[in-house]
Image (cartoon, grey):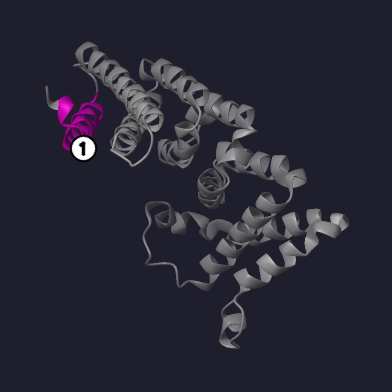
Amino acid sequence: VAAFDARGGSSPEDLVEELVSRSHHWDITIQSFVQFGKALIRSSGSFAKEFSALLTGSPKECESPQLRRVLLGVHVLQQLFESHDAVRNDILRQCQQEILNDSDCSTFYIHLLARLCIECKSAVAEYSALVKECLDCFLIISPEVAVYYFISILPLMAGSSDLKNYAVIVLRKAMFSRDYNHRFTAIKCLMHLALAETLSSDFVGAPMPGSHASFSQQSQGANSSSSMVGEICKDMLGFLRKGLKQQYSLRKTLYNGFTGLARVNSNLET
């Protein structure tokens, strides 16, 4: 990739977009493109875990040739997902498999899934059953990967109350699991969901120019988000009251989470 850039001209990403744009009549080769994208991601090998900062937005490693090669693979799969509905199920199932297996490449597939949920939300929403399957099992993987996975699908939940409610049910059950990792993951995910709902309600509830009907829809959206935040906070307060003997790290996570929520939603202070 670095050598390609050094010669000047189009970037590898531009070349990928050009090839994909012309591939609509190359049905035989589309699956080969998918395998090529997977191979680029797989090339990270045992070094994939070193790039976990990618999920936190750290730019320090972006100049690594190895990371750029893998991100090119992510770009290939994203472009194919956008352009060819025939490969969407395959790409999403690959994401699901790598994440639930907590593989060395799970970091990059979470990154891919996050980009798909943001830029191809309606297309991913058609496969909500796959997302629910992953939610049913995602507590078995490491807490860090599970939380990053949950954050990656938050944009999808913003447009699907069914998926959002399903996730809340899964997390409520996990909050009272005997397994410490399950409880920790559930609390972290609920905090992120509550924060996302609070921020979205602030946006939806902001006055915008338009008709009275549009303003009414915005108000209803804000009320719905506020209601969801209230329910989540009640769940976590109940957990705190019943679990005063919980591990210190769990209590600390709850306290820090409530503090963060109160900063963006003053109504929670009371």
Quick one: 216 or 46, which is closer to the camera?
A: 216
Residue 154 counted in the magenta span: no
Please give the name of the residue rendered at 13% of the width and 26% of the height, measured from the top-left corner: 269
Outermost residue, left direction? 270
What kind of residue is marked 1?
A: Val
Would you say residue 29 is visible in this rendering?
Answer: no
Q: Give residue 228's position: percent from left, percent from top.
A: 34, 22
Please give the name of the residue rendered at 72% of the width and 62% of the height, measured from the top-left corner: 20
- Tell me which secondary structure the magenta stretch mostly adopts: helix
Q: Which residue is mark 1?
A: 264
Quick one: 213 or 233, which is closer to the camera?
A: 213
Please give the name of the residue rendered at 40% of the width and 32% of the height, measured from the top-left corner: 214
Residue bounds of the magenta highlight = 247-268
Quick one: 157 or 183, which is closer to the camera?
A: 157
Residue 250 in which image quadrant? top left
Quick one: 125 or 201, which is closer to the camera?
A: 201
